[in-house]
Amino acid sequence: MRYIKAFYRFLRDIYQNRRLLKDLVKNDFKSRYLNNYLGILWAFIQPTISVLIFWFVFQVGFKAAPVQDVPFILWLVAGMIPWFFLSEALASATNAILDSTFLVKKIVFRVSLLPIVKITSAVIVHLFFMAFMMSMYIIYGYEPNLYWLQMFYYLFSAIILLLGISWITSSVVIFFRDLGQLVSMSIQFGFWLTPIFWSLSMVPKEYRWLFELNPAHYITQGYRDALINHVWFWEKPMEALQFWGITLVFFVLGAIVFRKLRPHFADVL
């Protein structure tokens, strides 16, 4: 009951601070790309170029064979684009408090909302790439269908997962600055340990459960289920229970860690 009340207060604070959060998201975009001629367009240009490079290398250059009867590039982007979101959101949310020390020191503000600013910025960019990805499927002759809508469920799932993890990383990094580098390394390892460039079917059955414990696999595979396999998320109840069990552990643990460390932020910063 205590955690339910705390979660309700958290949602209430988001609603009450919605205008401030909106302004902070705008400022976050501006601060990251202020000194560039193309401004915030770089947030969209860089990942787009990455996708186009992969398309040219694998589709035009290597002429990669189709996977699950779909062109390799379509299979690849269905896993890569949600990974772009996960990695970008986690990396930026880890530094959310360090990037906004003035809010911690001088303004009466619920600091636990700061990771949401970074995650929201990443969501805006991700929505663009969801549209970009769906456009690719349409260009290749795949018609939109109801299964595509469940990508928003997996996006919501990713947001809750990221929020819990970022509460831990963004609070601990204040006292242990090397954590930022460790998170970057973990993201690099996670990219290759998550079935993005390769299929989980390549792993012997007795070892697959190890990879399925990775919450990122649930998200990337969910996008592929929506776009390619046409499988609803409720048709995989065990995978869903496992993911949400891990996610809720991160969420509750993140809230506890953040609450314990919050009183000491101003002293260290």
Image (cartoon, rainbow, N blue to C red):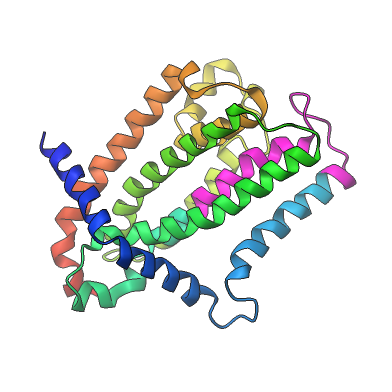
Residue 81 lies left or right of residue 253; in this view the side is right
> Considering the image in quadrants, where does the N terminus appear?
top left
Percent of width and height locating residue 37: 64, 81
Closer-to-camera residue (178/68): 68
| Secondary structure that dominates the magenta span | helix
Q: Up-down: is 1 above or below 18? A: above
Closer-to-camera residue (223/249): 223
Percent of width and height locating residue 146: 59, 28
Magenta segment: 59-88
Q: Up-down: is 54 above or below 202? A: below
* Point 63% across, 44% down: residue: 80
Closer-to-camera residue (30/266): 30
Any part of residue 173 in sight: no
- Does residue 86 show up magenta in the picture? yes
- Image-quadrant location for residue 101: bottom left
Closer-to-camera residue (128/79): 128
Percent of width and height locating residue 126: 55, 52
* Point 77% across, 54% down: residue: 53
Percent of width and height locating residue 90: 44, 54
- Image-quadrant location for residue 41: bottom right
